[in-house]
Amino acid sequence: MSYPWQKPGLTPDQQAAAVVAAMTTDEKFAWLSGPMAIPLTKDDKLPPEAIGSAAYYPAIPRLGIPALQQSDASLGVSALGGVRPGDHATALPSSLALGASFDPQLAEASGELLGREAFSKGFNVQLAGGANLIREPRGGRNFEYISEDPLLTGIIAGHSVRGIQSQHVVSTVKHFAVNAQETGRVLADSRLNESALRESDLLAFELAIEIGEPGAVMPGYNLINGHWASENAFLLSQVLKGDWRYPGWVMSDWGATHSATKAALAGLDVQSGANLDQQVWFDRPLREAVDRGEIKATKIDEMIRRILRSLFACGAIQHPAQRGRPIDYSWHQLIAQREAEQGIVLLKNDRNTLPLAPELSRILVVGAHADQGVLAGGGSSAVTPQGSLQFEGVDFMGIQTPKVYHPSSPLAAIRHNSLAKRVDFVSGESLDEALTAAEGSDAVIVFAEEWRSEALDAQGLSLDAHQNQLITRLSAVHSTVIVVLQTGGAVTLPWLESVPALLEAWYPGSGGGEAIAGVLFGRVNPAGRLPITFPADDQQLPHPTQKDPNTTTSLPGVEITGEVFEIDYNVEGADVGYRWFARQQHKPLFPFGFGLSYTQFRYENLQLSQTYGKISASVTLTNSGERSGSEVVQIYLRPVSGRYPSRLVAFKKVTLDAGESQRIDLGIEPRVIAQWDCTQQHWSITGEEVEIYQASDASSVGLTATVTLAAQSFGYPRH
Ligand code: BGC
């Protein structure tokens, strides 16, 4: 038997149109809203076909259309609330680690892994692609996002999405847009003028969408300039579906829909997690809106066509997901380990403390359950492989989500990598025990942690007082205290001067322990670079104070008691992260782009060319040290007039053997150096003199060349 969409030679749009034409009204509405496919009470029953995940929409067997089975998220196939007991999955390192790799190929490989696992578990939609710009350094979900820079975020998120979709699994990008904090996330109104919005947060999404062609976009919980993201006509209709000609579907976040007519007309196609909303808007109220003539029946068809079009475009209908297909977890763990290795950032290495010599005779490992595993971020993205250590976490959308340590023990890996006679472990809970154990050790490796979760912002940038005290006290009595951070973002480090070596390992995932040990002992030459600025203190931030999370309801599915409140992101505008620090002339603790290596790199002969307004840079890079290693070539631009602070305009990760040289060519994306002209509704590059320079981070300047930009403007085809 063949289905209408199987006629040879049809494009995804034509295939989708053929299916829509054959669907009944009820079949259509069954796909326009759905509850969370996780029972929230013991009376909630899942349909027998639902695998158990974020969402399920029924199959249409007579048309050869499989059910939509949607799973979270960017860091692995999660099973929120233990919905699939005993389920195992590979936990990828946090997206910050991927950002720190500055490596699009790695992003694609980790996306492929995610897509393969999702496909083999029966899922055809992965709620991945976290592409929010890290505007609020204390944001609870920063570990799910990539960086504070639109170019880096867009490229890495885009490649990750491309990897997922190569496995016939649709990926989202989320949470569109300016969804920068968790505190009061359903009430926070992000205020940002259009130019700044287009040049920062939207640019990250725009690039990610161009590169990855995600099948779906998920608006955030928040409001943007007075309208909830899920019913924001400017964002969804004018920019996404209009200017960017986005052909896929827009699905709301779970419990983030607030209306039927307004939302549908603004461009929302599906109400997800409808049981968490005040009501199911996209069924009866939407049908009634059609009956009243507020919404055309063809609009309903368009909403469905967009879903089907995306499914066809990535082959999710032609190659239905195969639940139960074997997964090679050992291979996947190695991929996760490699990603963690590429994302670890060496922040300090005085006296060449690292790599550690294998022949040290006594090592002490302290803290953060390093004898058991590595920390993971919490919330809907949390993957809980078998053997994870779990503690009480947060109550989130009525579901308990634990604080999880992935079963990849740094202690075991350190023992494995070292020839030391003794590698001891203490929990660090008792200062006295740790100080006593440190006596006679050749090196003390302290694991410091900071747990973040969806629905829970960090309050301030500090580690907890006990850990700060532990490190201060240990470094007062021992000269070789090495600190390994596992954090969900930037933290302050009051003891920095007194420790010789420091690593940022983020949340490093299923191969995290091995990856950390690999860097400590030199099997891996660290190459990660900070994708976010580490501020010296909260006072340097555009918004030094935070809203008290206890005064605002932050969860859907819970009665919203607070009032909508504004966050004025016009304070920093498009100057997010390092650009803000440059504008204010603040000296950060560690700048964006910073990271050390066990080798050295030399740059020579920076040259620029400008053809038809498109600028390229080239530079010769030499590994002038004694071991092979990777460098992230970073190119920044700043106007000679100082009119705006410098911007990262190109980057490339390059691996060279000791002594090897390579000429590196980098193209510069025009939108990154343009300003958005609101009146004309186009991008505009001012014909002015700029410095284009190579730098090892956002606070330094290396080889520099000056060029006068060709004045130009460019926009979008009018719709
Ligand atoms: C999160 C989304 C997630 C969804 C489904 C929401 O709370 O914000 O990122 O995809 O839940 O679990």
Image (cartoon, rainbow, N blue to C red):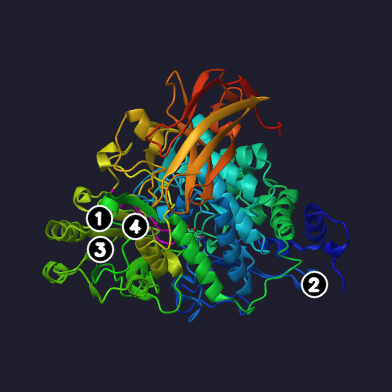
At mark 1, the secondary structure is loop
The mark total stands at 4
Residue under the point 87% across and 70% down? 2
Mark earlier in primary sequence (2, 4): 2
Residue pointed to by mark 1? 463
Residue pointed to by mark 4? 487
Is 693 situated left or right of 170 in this image?
left
Quadrant housing the C terminus: top right
Up the image or down, 590 lies above or below 364; here it is above
Amino acid on which disc 4 is placed = Thr
* Camera-nearest label, 2 or 4: 4
Is 447 situated left or right of 647 in this image?
left
Amino acid on which disc 3 is placed = Val
SS majority, magenta: loop
Residues at marks 4 and 1, CA–CA distance in whole angstroms: 9 Å
Q: Is residue 70 visible?
A: yes
Amino acid on which disc 1 is placed = Leu
Would you say residue 616 sits in the magenta stretch?
A: no
Neighbour tally class for label 4: few under 14, some 14-19, many 20 plus, Cα within 10 Å = many
* Camera-nearest label, 4 or 3: 3
Q: Does the residue labelled 2 lie within 8 Å of ligand 1?
A: no
